[in-house]
Amino acid sequence: MLSAADREIRLGFWKIHILHHAALREVWGTWLLEELAEHGHSLSPGTLYPALTRMERNGWLRRTGTAPHARARQTFRITPAGRRLLKELRREVTALYKEVALDAESEPKAGRS
C-alpha cells in the first residue's frame, strides 16, 4: 500500500501516462489498470476512476460513446486541451528527466540553492 505522499506524487505520473495513451486510442478503466500494472504501478479502481472523472471535468479527456448502464465500459479519448497539456508536460518531463535521472545540471542556476 502506498503512503498518501507517495500516491500523491505518482498520481501525476499516472495521469500523464493516461493522456499519452488516450492520445493514441480509446482507453477504458480495466485496460488502463492493466497497462499501468505492466509498468509497475498498482492502482485500485478506487484510485483510477476518480482520476479519470477529474481529468474529464478538467477538460483533458472526453467520454466516447454511451454506456447502457453505470457498470458498462466507459471509453475516453484525449481532448484538444488534453493534447496541449500533454505536449507541455512532455517538455517538462524531458527536462526533469535530464536533470534528475541524467544529472545533466551540474551547476546550480542563479537564484537557486
Image (cartoon, rainbow, N blue to C red):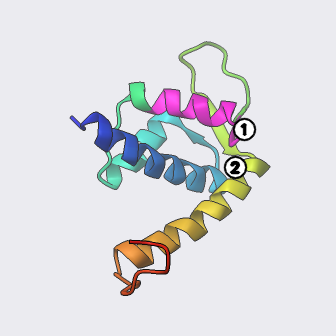
Q: Secondary structure at mark 1?
A: loop
Q: Quadrant of the N terminus?
A: top left
Q: Which residue is mark 1?
A: 59
Q: Is residue 39 above or below residue 50?
A: below
Viewer-side residue, 98 vs 61: 98
Is 66 contained in the magenta span? no
Q: Residues within 10 Å of mark 2 (few under 14, many from 20)?
A: many
Q: Secondary structure at mark 2?
A: helix
Q: What residue type is disc 1 on?
A: Gly
Q: What residue type is disc 2 on?
A: Gly
Q: Is residue 67 above or below residue 110?
A: above
Q: Which residue is mark 2?
A: 82
Name the residue at the front extreme.
Answer: 111
Numbered circle sitting on residue 102: none
- Residue 51 location in percent, x, y? 51, 33
Residue at (51, 46) in percent of width and height: 15
Horizontal side of residue 89 vs 84, given as left or right: left
Horizontal side of residue 100 vs 14, given as left or right: left
Name the residue at the top extreme.
Answer: 69
Viewer-side residue, 1 vs 99: 99
Q: Is residue 91 above or below residue 5?
A: below
Residue at (43, 43) in percent of width and height: 11
Sequence-first disc among 2 and 1: 1
Residue at (72, 23) in percent of width and height: 66
Q: What is the magenta segment's predominant secondary structure?
A: helix
Q: Quadrant of the C terminus?
A: bottom left
Q: How many marks?
A: 2
Q: Residues within 10 Å of mark 1 (few under 14, many from 20)?
A: some
Horizontal side of residue 88 vs 109, given as left or right: right
What's the magenta region? 48-62
Residue at (68, 36) in percent of width and height: 58
